[in-house]
Image (tube, grey):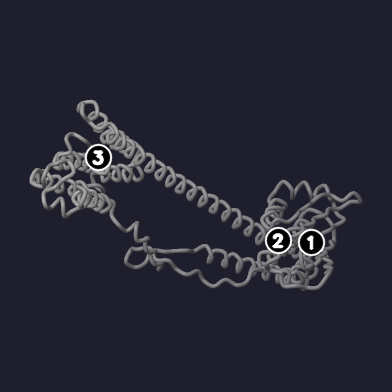
Amino acid sequence: MHATPTLPLLKRVPPGAWTALTWMVVTIYPALLVGHHGAVAWLNGIAADGHSAADRDWNLLSLAALVALAGSALLERRPLAAMALLITASLGVASGWRYGGQLPPLQFLAADIALCLITATRPRRASRIAAAMLIGMLVAHIAMVPDTDIGDAQGSVLLAVIAWLIGRSMHQSRDYAEKFGAQAAAQAVTAERLRIARELHDIVAHTIGIVALQAGAARRVIDTQPARARDALGEIETASRETLSGLRRMLGALRQAEPSADGERATREPAPMEPGPGLADIARLAETTKAAGVLVDVQWRGERRHYPPEIDMSAFRIVQEAVTNVVRYANTQSCQVSIDCQEAELSIEVLNDGDGRRNGSTSGSGLGLVGMRERVDLLHGEFSAAPRPEGGFRVAARLPVPAGVR
């Protein structure tokens, strides 16, 4: 089973903890800095506004602290109720400090952070209501209290607007990430389906063509040449077993998880897969095709090299599909396969002198040429398939080898 990744430390902190911490900081801050001599002067009864510590409404300040902590605790479950409690607590503290109707911007910082968190994590409707509650309260206070310090009031409104904009930006970024992730997942699923369809086509199409030809040959000679019929049936059995083995490997790779005994889904490691076919299997492909009645002349150029698995397997599938089209459509007894092994690229060419128009039109309207072209495109190569001017059909592919794996 896969272990659940641990969240970063900051994301493990509940949203209410941020507002509670902010509340404590901005509440203690005036006590430490009020007056010219800091906390000592404040505790001795000297304040910048001429009032002593006894003039503070400690009951109101204590009640406001309880309300703020309650709002912080409710932020995740009841965000709008939490916003209302934080706004109320901020107003209570402003009254308890005897600010004379003023609303210091820092005193509403906890409510600003709550607004940012609500906007970032909640639906747009909740975000708008929370913003209207906070900004509306500040604007109403400016309108109703004539002696409000316009600088402090504007600062409080500006902080609230900035908090809403930051939260909105975070919300949009998260939405974009989710949509992008869903789109990437959908594209990955589509690509995987295309890959599976391509593999199934390449595995089955060649075998079915060989089986059809061998079965027809066996039917024609079963009475007059039993030995040849027996050989044809043996080729059918061999091709069928190989195809069945390939299908089992693919199905084994597709099995990702199954329910465990206790009802939970447990991830299973896929069964080990045998290596897929590659250029080393070209000779066997030629022998199988020869048994079906089409001679495959394989010509190697350059030094035989070890290519990356995706290039090696794609090269084999391209040759296999091209030869299969020759067997099924070209109406000819032979074809030529040229493989040029170079350090920077692998070039493939399959030629036949059969019915080029039938070979091209029939296979081109199906999945054969489409699958070959997709394989080459995925490897950033070049592909061409067209009738030859002198007759027959030509399939050519160039597969570049990445510089880092040469």
Which-is-in-front pick, marks 2 and 3? 3
- The residues bearing labels 2 and 1 have C-alpha atoms spaced at a distance of 18 Å
Q: Identify the secondary structure beneath mark 2.
A: helix
Q: Quadrant of residue 166?
A: top left
Crowd class of label 2 (few under 14; some 14 to 19; many from 20; radius 10 Å): many
Residue that numbered label 2 is attached to: 206
> Nearest the camera: 386 or 219?
386
> Nearest the camera: 86 or 329?
86
Q: Is residue 222 visible?
A: no
> Nearest the camera: 384 or 37?
37
Q: Is residue 70 visible?
A: yes
> Nearest the camera: 402 or 80?
80
Residue that numbered label 1 is attached to: 348
Indicate left or right for 357 with 240 as reference. right
The reply to whether callout 1 and callout 3 are in contact (CB within 8 Å) is no
Q: For residue 319, which numbered disc appears in the image?
A: none
Q: Identify the secondary structure beneath mark 3.
A: loop
Indicate left or right for 389 with 237 as reference. right
Residue 333: image x %, image y %?
Answer: 85, 61
Q: For residue 104, which numbered disc appears in the image?
A: 3
